[in-house]
Image: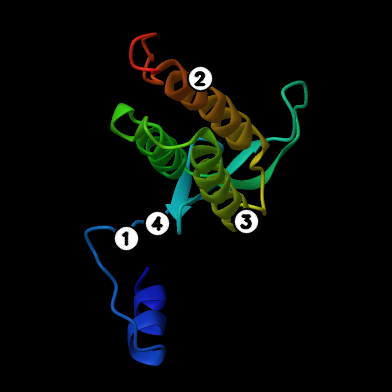
């Protein structure tokens, strides 16, 4: 750890945040780390495999943040917006998220995001103001 500190601070001019900095052994399946919204850890190659390899995928916090943004786009206070506009906003959010997390193992997280998009859009559609026959003129 001392060598790393010296290298970062003296040679590279960076300052370590000692409260947030920790050493992890990425060769142990029980340990991992989150860096720039990616989670790095040793995981099984597949559910049926006994082979482990290093993997990176979107962190749970970044998945939840994207889910919150999708929900924000479709909240009831925005129900007067046209459906096409809401879909464009949702697609823009998901496209940006997908471009950032396009490397690693994003399939599982992407599946959750698509399910969230469908749920949010369904809720938005159900909130569409009901038009009474009298108000239609």
Find disc 4 in the rendering and name its residue.
23
Asked if the residue at tag 4 contacts the one at tag 3, i.e. Cβ–Cβ closer than 8 Å, the answer is no
| Residue 20 coordinates in the image, percent (x, y) | 27, 58
Find disc 3 in the rendering and name its residue.
99
Q: Which residue shows up at 58% across the image and 35% down it? A: 109
| Residue 103 coordinates in the image, percent (x, y) | 67, 54
Vertical order, 132 against 53 (above or below):
above
| Residue 117 coordinates in the image, percent (x, y) | 53, 30
> Which numbered disc, 2 or 1, marks the residue that appears first in the sequence?
1
> Which numbered disc, 1 or 3, marks the residue that appears first in the sequence?
1
Vertical order, 109 against 119 (above or below):
below
Find disc 2 in the rendering and name its residue.
122
Front residue of 118 and 36: 118
Find disc 1 in the rendering and name its residue.
21
Which mark's residue is nearer the viewer, 2 or 3?
Answer: 2
Q: Is residue 82 left or right of residue 129?
A: right
Real-space Cα distance between discs 4 and 2? Answer: 44 Å
């Amino acid at each position: 750890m001392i060598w790393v500190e010296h290298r970062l601070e003296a040679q590279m001019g960076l300052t370590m945040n000692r409260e947030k900095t920790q050493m992890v052994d990425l060769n142990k399946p029980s340990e991992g780390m989150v860096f720039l919204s990616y989670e790095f850890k040793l995981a099984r190659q597949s559910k049926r495999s006994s082979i482990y390899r290093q993997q990176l995928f979107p962190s749970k916090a970044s998945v939840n943040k994207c889910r919150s943004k999708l929900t924000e786009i479709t909240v009831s206070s925005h129900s007067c917006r046209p459906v096409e506009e809401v879909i464009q906003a949702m697609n823009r959010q998901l496209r940006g998220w997908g471009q950032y997390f396009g490397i690693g193992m994003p399939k599982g997280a992407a599946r959750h995001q698509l399910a969230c998009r469908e749920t949010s859009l369904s809720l938005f559609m159900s909130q569409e103001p009901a038009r009474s026959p009298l108000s239609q003129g």
